[in-house]
Image: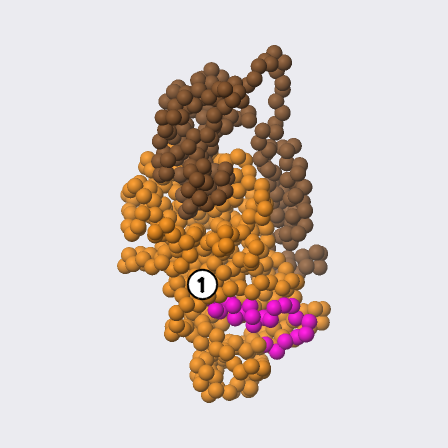
Amino acid sequence: MHSLSRYFVIVLLPLLAGIAGQRAHAALEIQVTGGAANKIPVALMNFQSASNRPNPELTEIIGQDLLRSGQISLVAGTAGQQIFEPSQINYPAWRGKGADAIVIGQIVSLPGGRFEVRFRLIDTIKQTQLVGLSFNIGPEQWRAAAHKIADIVYEKLTGSPGVFSTRIAYVQKRGKQYELRVADADGQNGQTVVRSNEPLISPAFSPEGDRLAYVSFEDRKPIVYVQSLRDGSRRTVASFKGSNSAPAWSPDGSRLAVTLTRDAGSQIYLINTDGSGLKRLTISSAIDTEPAWSPDGRSIYFTSDRGGSPQIYRVSSEGGEVKRITFEGTYNVSPDVSPDGKYLAYIKRDSGRFQVALLDLATSQVRVLTDTAHDESPSFAPNGQLLLYATLSGGRGILGTVSLDGRTRARLSEPGSDAREPVWGP
Amino acid sequence: MKRILLPLLVLGALSGCETLGLGGEKAAIEDRNAGQTASKSSASTTNSAASGGTQTSALGAGGLNGKSLDGDKMQMDPRKDPASPLSKRSIYFDFDSYVVRDEYRSVVEAHAAYLNGNRSARVIVQGNADERGSREYNLALGQKRAEAVRKSLSVLGVPESQLEAISFGEEKPRSSGSSEQDYAENRRADIVYGDE
């Protein structure tokens, strides 16, 4: 066998905003229903740790990421078992426990408060290393390092890129104040980018993730703004007579689809991100709102009550003929298209319950993914394998993720917060 | 702060990753101040790099712009006179309906007459919706209610230049509960004058 240290690569982690590890975070609540039949079983061993490491354990964050994906199950080892090097692995024993792979690692304290984090992902069947990496990090990169490791493990095992290093945006209500926040994909490290005494709704990440479009009521009516996450500067994009809302970025980042009422009731328009080039897209006497682009930029899905009840329709982004997409039920709203264009997530009302539904656009099969009653704002993860949404728990808004099979749900919000309007960014 | 910022920027540049600016704690303090002093300006302001990438929004200081007192007119503003139908500002709608009911005809007519007699007066009709379902769709439902009232005023001869229909959707409920009664209270359009 080769000397494994040869495979170590020093990686400077992309730094996510916010400072991790300075206070204990509430543990995520992950609920898995149904069997683990289609999950990849992985043994995640506690890393050999340094006494001055931030909290919580790196492997706790990695484990929660992997579990939340719904595609990986964790195989427990024997209590107190310590495995830090490949030579310590008893392969037949791990195969006996059903583990297809094992993750081991070490954290070494470096001068200046920094750490070296080493980890290896090992295939227990082939007895080969799938990946081995070393990261040199500051304590503020603790959580980012864990998410990076989870991404690498996830991608090696499933073939899809991981989404644990991505970010989400949402609106949090704190007393009478509204805060637009950007956080890590697990809901931690949240940072406020807009604070207002008036409502904020409908945040949308630009395709590059460097800007947020949103609707603010600070000027006595809904107006669409685009704000840079680099420097906090912002621009008014749509402030026409009447209401301005529901911004959705075109996949190339050049335009927004928005809902305006300047000419009639709520209708969908396209507008350049600098506020120029306004073009009306839908022409009806009904409500047309909640535009969502197909990933190829050719179509826009939207909610309309033109047929008597709110349903989801599709129109070419050049305008023209409108095609109805949802037929089951009398209330289907808030469409979001999967990154591969194959699925439509939306909110479906059934017997007074509002739930996240998934429509296979090829087969027209609909599956309800949640068992809650006040779900809103479904948003696909960049890899299309999870959905982020808002719901109510104990009268408060919380954020959750659900796998596309509906079997793995995680609650992201910390108790006590009131969160809504989530969107998953790059 | 400085110790953290430097590696932040360096790493951000190396990895092409975006930073959001500095931590929220400092910005929170600045924002609170902005909130308290917002009454000085009704316009929104953008505060970029100085507040560490956190954008502060001045709060709409509705109604706080001073208006000179007119000494000749000592009688009550008819719009505020409880005896006048002009003091009635809320129009309620049935569930799933966007028709201005007959009982509000006198209210709408009174406001149309006032607007026709005061060409400088301007009205914003604010539509609302109950909390059930999508926020954006509810914004559109509130808009539909506001449009119904706007059209009623328009039919009575009020020029479009004096009218604007907007929606608060479910965002500013008058009644915050979740009973049928609360929902009915929030299926509403309000007539608000520009100088109020």
**Which quadrant holds residue B75?**
top right
Q: Residue at x 42, y 48 (%)?
A: A250
Residue under mark 1: which chain is it in?
Answer: A
Q: How many other residues sit within 10 Å of disc 1, few (<14), some (14-19) or many (≥20)? A: many
Tell me residue A148's x, y (percent). Answer: 54, 67
Residue type at tag 1: Arg
Q: Is residue A67 magenta?
A: yes
Q: Which residues are magenta?
A: A47-69
- Return the residue nearer the eye: A101 or B135: B135
Q: Is residue A9 visible?
A: no
Tell me residue A244's x, y (percent). Answer: 46, 38
Tell me residue A272's x, y (percent). Answer: 45, 42
The residue under label 1 is A409
Q: Is residue A327 left or right of residue A197?
A: left
Colour assigned to chain A in the rendering is orange
Q: Residue at x 45, y 73 (%)?
A: A73
Q: Is residue B66 left or right of residue B174?
A: right
